[in-house]
Amino acid sequence: MLDSTPSFAAWRPSPFRVLTVCTANLYRSPVAECLLRQRLAALREAIHVSSAGTEAVPGAPMAAIAASMVAERGADPSGTVTRRLTAGLVDSADLVLGAATEHREAAVRLSPVRALSRAFSLREFARLVRAEDAAGATDPAARFAALVEGAAARRGAAGAGVADDDVSDPLGASPAAARECVTRIEESVERIAVAMQAR
């Protein structure tokens, strides 16, 4: 007997919600938020991107140097303010992307059932994502859902690169370290965007 249960990709509603997470929500997660929003701008009606921090003090603007680097890349950092990660935010997200493994784990602790298969570190997800997982999906939300489903199924079987899955916190670091942080985030965002937009 065939399994008639619809796949995750088939039944997730629009918009598809992506939540990026770091510690203070001042640097890594808002950079990822802004760059993802920019690269997926053509899909803005179907894909909603936001960010939060595990220890964020709500209402602060993103770090000035981060905002500057985001603007250099043509993305708009305006209106980005900090907020604390909550179970509600995790529950409402279809994909949680932590700056480091600790942020993925924090999301899973807040919402184990919801986040276990939908939370990754940013670089982990970029490493595992494959455009072919969404072959044939034309709706952007369904396409993103299929990419998440494929990446979750691949996790554990693809051990290469695991040690490189975290993006270090650049707060208080040198400008060179800050730039390296943004570059690492940008590389991951690009891989995700390419997978989303491939046909």
Image: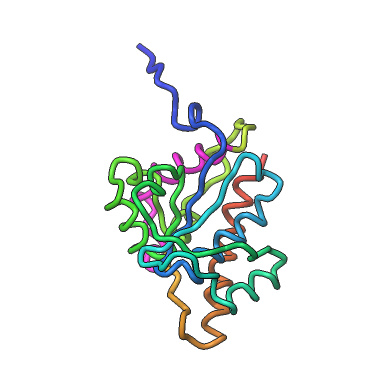
Q: Which residue is located at x 46 percent, y 80 percent?
A: 171
Quadrant of the drawing holding the N terminus: top left
Q: Which residue is located at x 46 percent, y 51 percent?
A: 128
Seen in the picture, residue 24 relative to 192 is either above or below; the reply is: below
The residue sitting at the front extreme is: 59
Assess whether residue 72 is covered by the magenta stretch. Answer: no
Q: Which residue is located at x 34 percent, y 41 percent?
A: 114
- Residue 67 position, x and y percent, is 61, 72
Assess whether residue 158 is covered by the magenta stretch. Answer: yes
Depth check: give the residue in front, 103 or 167.
Answer: 103
Q: How is colour applied across the structure in the image?
A: rainbow
Depth check: give the residue in front, 45 or 188.
Answer: 45
Q: Which residues are magenta?
A: 141-163
Depth check: give the residue in front, 52 or 95.
Answer: 52
**Which SS does the magenta portion mostly show?**
helix
Depth check: give the residue in front, 58 or 148.
Answer: 58
Horizontal placement of 128 versus 15: left or right? left
Could you say which quadrant of the image residue 80 lies in? Answer: bottom right
Q: Which residue is located at x 49 percent, y 65 percent?
A: 59
Could you say which quadrant of the image residue 75 lies in? Answer: bottom right
Seen in the picture, residue 141 relative to 125 is either above or below; the reply is: above
Horizontal placement of 121 versus 50: left or right? left
- Residue 107 position, x and y percent, is 34, 53
Quadrant of the drawing holding the C terminus: top right
